[in-house]
Amino acid sequence: GICPVVTVFSICSAMDQLVVSVDRPRKVATLTINRASKLGSLSKNVFEALVQALGELGADSEISCILLRSEGRAFSAGNAVVGDEIPPDGLAREAIAAMEDCPVPVVCLVQGFAYTGALEVLAAADIVLAGESAYFQDTHAQLGLVPTWGGNVRLPRAIGLRRAKDLVFTCRRVTAQEALAWGFVSRVVPDEQLFAEANLIADDIAKNSRDSIAKQKRVINEAARRPLGEALDWSVQAHPGHGSDMWERMQALRKKGKRPTSAESTKAGNEGRSKL
């Protein structure tokens, strides 16, 4: 059985390439890419483990936030390039899509550097937190490669067309502060505070309605794939309804003396009846 407090286990135990820590009282899971000697390179086993872990944690109603990090001095040097470690493109795309589709927010922690394929992973994260010394670099063009995991699609949507072209065409290093200004990174903190800050973010997320967040994540991601007008129409027609714990949370707010107005209560009640 699962320990009621903190459970730590590995997926792909042959090399323990992904270590999963589940803190149930806090409703937070931490996925650690355990390949420090390979600079966090993204192997077939890592992607297989990510697909499994994200699927299981996303289906666990007691998990509200997932942290994704790496051991060692780098988040990831990108794609593994040796023999059986090389991940099939389809598997990599499946794992990256699993991050986007997971109902639980995925927060990535970047220390050191993130190269090439690692950027394709980060572009699918919900929140990216970076240490002050972190930097980012896409080296596809240096090697004569073209991304096959969706990077050319997600990057422009994350940071804008011209910034994406700047990053992709020049292959230059982008600092954490510049990535923050571009919107690729959500927050930059001192290196030694990276994990602590990520856990504060996770705790803030876990205080809120898991169901509401899951529904909003789905709407935000789906709307981002559509033109603005179509997205607005779709968001009304396919509105998923409010969180299943809406009334409980409103009652708790009312007991604290912060009562919503009668108009707000009526509106919430009417809209709370899910259209799906």
Image (cartoon, helix red, strand yellow):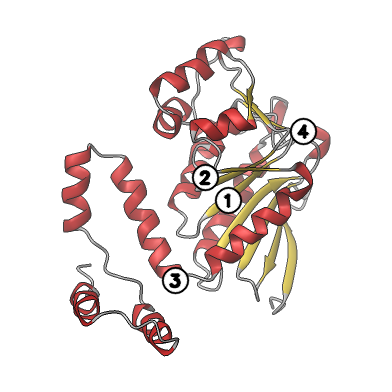
The amino acid marked with disc number 3 is Ser
Quadrant of the snapshot with the N terminus: bottom right
Which residue is drawn at the image coordinates 34% and 50% (left, top)? 220
Give percent across and percent down for residue 219: 32, 53
Distance of mark 2 from mark 4, alpha carbons? 20 Å
Between 60 and 198, the one nearer to me in the picture: 198
Seen in the image, is 7 located left or right of residue 142?
Answer: right
Give percent across and percent down for residue 55: 52, 58
Tag of residue 39: 4
Count of numbered labels shown in the rendering: 4
Question: In what element is the residue under mark 4?
Answer: loop
- Disc 2 or disc 3, which is closer to the eye? 3
Q: Are marks 2 and 1 in contact (CB under 8 Å)?
A: yes
Residue beneath label 2, please?
125
Asked if one can make out residue 19 in the rendered structure from this viewpoint, the answer is no
Distance of mark 1 from mark 4, alpha carbons? 20 Å
Seen in the image, is 241 located left or right of residue 156?
Answer: left
Give percent across and percent down for residue 216: 36, 58
Distance of mark 2 from mark 1, alpha carbons? 6 Å
Residue beneath label 3, please?
209
Which residue is drawn at the image coordinates 23% and 61% (left, top)? 239
Which residue is drawn at the image coordinates 71% and 48% (left, top)? 194
Between 37 and 202, the one nearer to me in the picture: 202
Question: In what element is the residue under mark 1?
Answer: strand
Between 79 and 136, the one nearer to me in the picture: 136
N-term-proximal mark, 3 vs 1: 1
N-term-proximal mark, 4 vs 3: 4
Residue beneath label 1, please?
107
